Each structure stands twice: as C-alpha cells, then as structure tokens.
Image (cartoon, grey):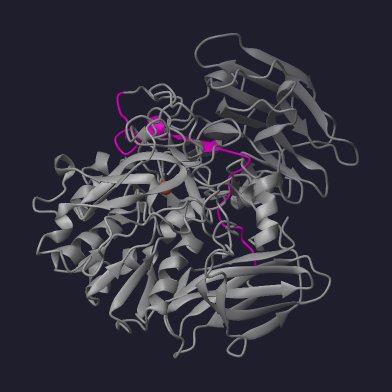
C-alpha cells in the first residue's frame, strides 16, 4: 500500500461547502494537511515546470496517522440473516457460472463466525464444490464433491445439513446436462446452521470478507428442511418452494445496490464493492438484449475478487471552502516525514453566480474512467524519468490494491465496467506521467489540463472551474452564465445529461470551445443510488480495450444502451463539428493552415498568425496533433457551413487505426504495433 494517500467525498465544492478527506497514513507520527492551488502540474523541466501557490496560511491541520485498509472483492451482505433459525435442517442452493479456477476456496454462500468457528459455507475449490461446517472447539469439517465445475457453464450447487439423519451432503449438476455428483458424510455432533454472523453471497468471512467468488451467482436460496433432491430446486418468485427461508431474486433492483429476498422474512441485503449486474443469467435465451425487457433472464450477478466501490474510509478532517477562495484547481497536500501526496479538488464559483467570463469544465468523468489505469508499461526507463523529474511516484501497475480502471480487465478476462472515485485515484494527481514520451511530457487528463489553465492565467484571462458532475447536476443553465465555455484536453466520457447541457448551451448561442480529441465519445451511466460511480459498457463498435459480453450492452445503472454516443444517435460531429476518427502511438505532428482560416467569418481566430504550419512543437508528444485524431464529417453531423481552419498531417501511414477497426478480429495489421492502442483512447 502507498504509505500516505487518500480521497475526498466529492470532487468540487462552492464557497461555504465542505469536502471530507479520508486519509490512510502509515507514518509513525502525525501527518500534516495543507491547502495549495495548482497552476501547472507538468513536471517536465523543458516546460514551465510545477507551479503551485502555497495556501497553508488559509488551511493547515495536523492529524494522527492511521492505516485505513482497502479490501477488494465484491459480495452481497445480508445482515438480517440473524433472523434465520439457529438450529434444525438447512438446504442451501444456488446457480453458479464460475469464471476463474483458483487454488483456494471461492465462497458462493456462507454464514461463518470466525470467532467461535461456527457456521457453514458452500464454496468451490480445487476439490470441487465444498461444504464447510463449523465444529465448536475443533477444526472445521469439510466435504467436497469433485471435480471443480467447468468454467463458464451454469451449474446448480447445494449443501444440505440434516441433523435428524445426522448427515451433511454437498453436490452439483450442470444445467446443460451432465452427471449429478453428490457426496455425503456424517454430520459432526453438535453442529448446526446457526452462526452469529451475516450471510454473505459471493464471499466468506474471517473478520473481513475473504474467499471471494469469481463468476456469476443466481437465485441463491435457503430452505428450512433437508431437501431430498436439491438439484430440482428452483426459485420461482411467484411460487416459492416449500420451506423457503430466504431466496434472493437478483432481477429486482438491478439499478441499485439492493438484493431482494422473496422469502417470508424479506431478508434483503446490500452489495459491497459493486459486482456487475445486468448480466445474462442461467435463463437467458438471447431473445432480449436489454435486462429491462426480460429481468428474470438477467437474474445473475457477476462477482469479482478485484471489484471495488467505496473504500469506506473514515473522514479524517473536513475542509470548508472559504467564501473568498477563488474558483480553481486546488490540492490538499499531505506530508509525514518522507511520505507525501496531493489530493486534487475543484473550487467552483459561488452558486448561482459567475466570477469570470470563461468557464473551464474539468473532465472528471474521463479522469474517473481512466482512474488507476494499469497499462503494464512501467519499465525502468519510465521509472528513471519519474525519478529525474520528481514526477508522481506511484503507478497503478505497482498498486493493484486500489482497484482498476475501465480500461482494464478483471483477472479472468472480462472488462471492468465500473469506476468509483471513492478510493485513491493514482492517475488523478499532479505530476502523474502516463507515458514515457520521447518528445514531450507524456501527461494526460488532470495534469495535462493544467497546461490550459496555466496559459489562461499567464494571459490574464480569469476562469471559473466546474466539473462534469456539476454540469450533470445543473445542466445548460450553469453554462449559460458564461460567454465562453472551454473543455479540457480529453472530454471523452459523457452522460446524456452532460451532452444535453453542452447542446443546450450551444443552442442558446453559447460559445463552446472543444479543446480535446476523442471527445464526447463513450456513453456512461450514473445513478444516485450507487454514489461516486460511472459505468461504461463498451458495446458494438469503437476503438476499445475490451468488448461488452454478449447480451450485456445495457447499463445496469440506468438501463440505457451503452457504447459510443455515435451508436446512440449522437455523434460528436453533431455537437462540436468533429469526432473521433483514428488513433495511433503517443506521438504528434502539426496542423497546416487551410483556406477556411481566411474566411471573413473566422479570420479573427488566426489574425496576426502568418504561419502555414501550426503547432509543430510543444510539451505533448512534440506537436499539437496526434495520438487521437478527430475529423469533420458531414455524414455524421458536421454542420453545413462549418469552417475548417487547419488540418493535421504527417502522422505516418503505418501506425494509425481507424475508428471501426480495433477489435482483435477486425484489426488491420499495422507495420508496427501502436503502443497507444494497447491502452487506447
Ligand atoms: Fe480516451
């Protein structure tokens, strides 16, 4: 773990509003937190360098150090399981679709009290489907029905505790047909189903969640009897089986963290660490692709041992934004001995007002989509540059413990479709280097956008700052206060509401300056019931690191079709005139001035600039145009009358992929492998 780090409960606040800081510090003594404003966050010594304004005189505080752990892995927790009978027979049944063979147990269902050694667990391990029964005062009793179920195939698995007959049984059967396997053994004396512990679905418990399940689980149920034929037990929410104690129908509340019990006690539970919902279940027929149209065909939840949502750290201190603190980009600096970190946040202008003519929208949804992107590229040369430049020292490649980005895959191969900001985001830091850039800084996102903010400040242009979440919450009226609105360098991820806000601003006569590439590209979903999270389903097309699984292209969080905005009828060309066209390595060329630059309607833009070649220099890959290229395209909505002032050229013919061609099967063979496309867009 990183010795000193943290996160905030929100990314922006207006004067008078509070931000809570959640810190983990392994330092021996207290740590110090102090306020600073960020002007320029690119450590490249060839550029302006790091510029910050120390504001410790406005806010500084000392707090005792404490380590706050982050336990990855998703599961459902049913605290109300205390209402279940502590004695008597028990049958536990579930449908499972395993995705990862492990050398350890992976719990499907468990109720285990580590302190007393009481309880039971139904898991899958190397020996197959395994039952574990607590024996007070002795080691747990286990029995397994091998072999381990085949991966990516539905099975019904069960555990039967039968005190009257004095036996325990464990078994499995593939749903697609195959051998029923069951083993039974004498039930150790004095054991039963009771345990002073919550019931967990998808994990075990040993003081904290453990033995995480990797795969789908559907229709877990508990009966208060010793079923003779557990393989025939199914959860029909309308006709519950006899003796049902509890049965969780995951097709209910797919857009929430709740899991609902259709049994008589209504033992509802809550999901921890955000497993994936809106996934195909054992009953999926393929007739419907959207879970809203056939929820029982989507009654499964996919759990992963590396899922993460809210780290759940306690608040160490609050910061209330002073009434006179100007809108801008700030950090809370943390320091304890040799350890340091900086947690960024944004100060908005006072609510309902503007304090400048220009508004900058920080692309926080995009920052979040990339948060903790492990690229597998942290080599000796990268580390040497980080050390030489004093860049941010912690790379996600080295720290899987903070969860992955929506550019990564889970361990068994499917894409990570959620990203939470309620955890340390190592890529959302000043001085963070994304690439080892031979001709520039190799920065993107948060630090890259300070190039613009520093330039505005140097030019004496006052600027307010808000985030994507602010734009989502307040829409076009927030933007409409400003004569000019600027995007950052990569405003790629948008909800319908943030697109509506931009479109509404333009429709009202606003001047929107799109300063990025590959902007307004992916559709994301959010839901207030799942705080701090964005969801992306990389469906159908587009340059992408993973494809949504078949039948899983609709977001869980809002029920809408995921993927490109272009595939959702809103290509970026319609909004801002240009949209994503091609991607290549992190290298850049320049723009060449076009006749449109002299059009009387637009001549003011390059007035006084005589050069034919524009931007053949700079701190990003050595030029102004590269890596991700947009194009004007009337067929995709570039408005009639749009004026092209300049076009880029000289990108190298062999290293660029067009927008339609980034699946492993349809990808053309570039002469050399573009490093950007192993971690694209
Ligand atoms: Fe991107």
Q: Residue at x 28, y 58 (%)?
A: 497
Q: Please, what is the dominant secondary structure of the magenta stretch?
A: loop
In the image: residue 65, left or right of residue 245: right
Residue 444 magenta: no
In this rendering, the answer to whether 366 lies above or below 140 is: below
Q: Residue at x 25, y 45 (%)?
A: 631
Q: Is residue 36 visible?
A: yes
Q: Is residue 557 visible?
A: no
How many numbered circles does the render carry? Answer: 0
Q: Residue at x 75, y 21 (%)?
A: 127
The image shows residue 161 at horizontal and vertical percentages of 71, 29
Residue 312 magenta: yes
In the image: residue 317, left or right of residue 592: right
The magenta segment is 287-314
Depth check: give the residue in front, 344 or 145.
Answer: 344
Q: Residue at x 18, y 64 (%)?
A: 506
Q: Quadrant of the C terminus?
A: top left
Q: Residue furthest right?
A: 137
Q: Quadrant of the N terminus?
A: bottom right
The image shows residue 651 at horizontal and vertical percentages of 37, 40
Occupied quadrant, residue 334:
bottom right
Occupied quadrant, residue 287:
top left
The image shows residue 673 at horizontal and vertical percentages of 50, 30
Depth check: give the residue in front, 194 or 499.
Answer: 499
In this rendering, the answer to whether 442 lies above or below 131 is: below
The image shows residue 387 at horizontal and vertical percentages of 70, 58
Depth check: give the residue in front, 153 or 493.
Answer: 493
């Amino acid at each position: 773990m990183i010795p000193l780090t943290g996160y905030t409960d929100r990314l922006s606040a207006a004067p008078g509003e509070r931000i809570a800081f959640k810190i983990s510090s392994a330092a021996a003594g207290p740590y110090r937190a102090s306020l600073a404003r960020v002007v320029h966050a690119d450590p490249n010594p060839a550029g302006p360098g790091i510029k910050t304004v120390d504001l410790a005189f406005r806010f500084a505080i000392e707090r005792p150090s404490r380590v706050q752990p982050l336990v990855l892995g998703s599961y459902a927790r049913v605290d109300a399981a205390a209402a279940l009978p502590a004695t008597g027979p028990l049958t536990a049944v579930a449908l499972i679709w395993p995705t990862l063979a492990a050398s350890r147990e992976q719990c499907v269902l468990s109720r285990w009290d580590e302190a007393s050694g009481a309880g039971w667990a139904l898991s899958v391990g190397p020996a197959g489907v395994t039952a574990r029964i607590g024996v007070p005062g002795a080691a747990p009793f286990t029995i397994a029905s091998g072999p381990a179920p085949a991966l990516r195939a539905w099975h019904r698995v069960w555990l039967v505790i039968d005190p009257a007959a004095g036996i325990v049984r464990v078994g499995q059967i593939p749903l697609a047909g195959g051998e029923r396997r069951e083993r039974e053994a004498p039930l150790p004396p004095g054991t039963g189903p009771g345990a002073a512990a919550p019931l967990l679905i998808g994990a075990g418990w040993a003081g904290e969640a453990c033995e995480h399940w990797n795969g789908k689980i559907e229709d877990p149920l508990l009966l208060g009897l010793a079923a003779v034929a557990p393989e025939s037990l199914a959860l029909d929410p309308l006709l519950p089986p006899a003796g049902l104690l509890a049965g969780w129908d995951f097709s209910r509340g797919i857009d929430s963290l709740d899991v609902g019990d259709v049994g008589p006690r209504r033992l509802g539970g809550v999901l921890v660490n955000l497993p994936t919902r809106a996934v195909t279940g054992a009953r999926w027929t393929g007739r419907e692709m959207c879970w809203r149209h056939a929820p029982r065909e989507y009654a499964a939840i996919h759990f992963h041992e590396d899922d993460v949502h809210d780290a759940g750290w306690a608040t160490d201190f609050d910061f209330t934004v002073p009434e006179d603190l100007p809108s801008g980009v700030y950090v809370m600096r943390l320091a304890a001995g040799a350890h340091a970190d900086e947690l960024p946040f944004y100060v908005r202008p006072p609510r309902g007002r503007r304090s400048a003519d220009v508004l900058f929208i920080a692309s926080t949804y995009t920052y979040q989509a990339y948060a903790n992107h492990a690229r597998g590229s942290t080599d000796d040369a990268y580390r040497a540059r980080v050390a030489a430049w004093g860049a941010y020292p912690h790379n996600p490649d080295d720290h899987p413990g903070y969860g992955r980005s929506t550019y990564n895959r889970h361990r068994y191969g499917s894409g990570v479709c959620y990203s939470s900001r309620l955890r340390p985001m190592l890529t959302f830091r000043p001085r963070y280097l994304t690439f080892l850039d031979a001709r520039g800084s190799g920065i993107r996102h948060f630090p890259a956008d300070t190039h613009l903010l520093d330039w505005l400040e140097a030019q004496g242009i006052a600027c307010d700052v808000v985030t994507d979440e602010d734009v989502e919450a307040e829409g076009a009226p927030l933007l409409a206060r400003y004569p000019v609105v600027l995007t950052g360098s990569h405003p790629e991820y948008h909800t319908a509401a943030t697109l509506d806000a931009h479109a509404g601003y333009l429709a009202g006569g606003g001047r929107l300056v799109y300063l990025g590439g590959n902007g307004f590209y992916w559709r994301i979903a959010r839901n207030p019931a799942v705080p701090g999270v964005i969801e992306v389903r990389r469906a159908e097309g587009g340059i992408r690191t993973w494809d949504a699984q078949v039948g899983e292209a609709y977001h869980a969080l809002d029920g809408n079709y995921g993927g490109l905005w272009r595939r959702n009828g809103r290509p970026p060309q319609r909004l801002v005139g240009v949209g994503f066209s091609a991607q290549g390595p992190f290298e850049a060329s320049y723009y060449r001035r076009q006749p449109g630059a002299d059009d009387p309607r637009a001549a003011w833009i390059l007035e006084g600039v005589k050069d034919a070649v524009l931007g053949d220099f700079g701190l990003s890959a050595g030029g102004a145009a590269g890596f991700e290229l947009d194009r004007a395209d009337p067929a995709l909505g570039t408005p009639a009358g749009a004026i092209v002032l300049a076009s880029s050229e000289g990108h190298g013919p062999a290293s660029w992929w067009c927008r339609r061609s980034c699946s492993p099967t349809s990808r053309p063979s570039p002469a050399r492998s573009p490093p950007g496309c192993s971690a694209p867009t």
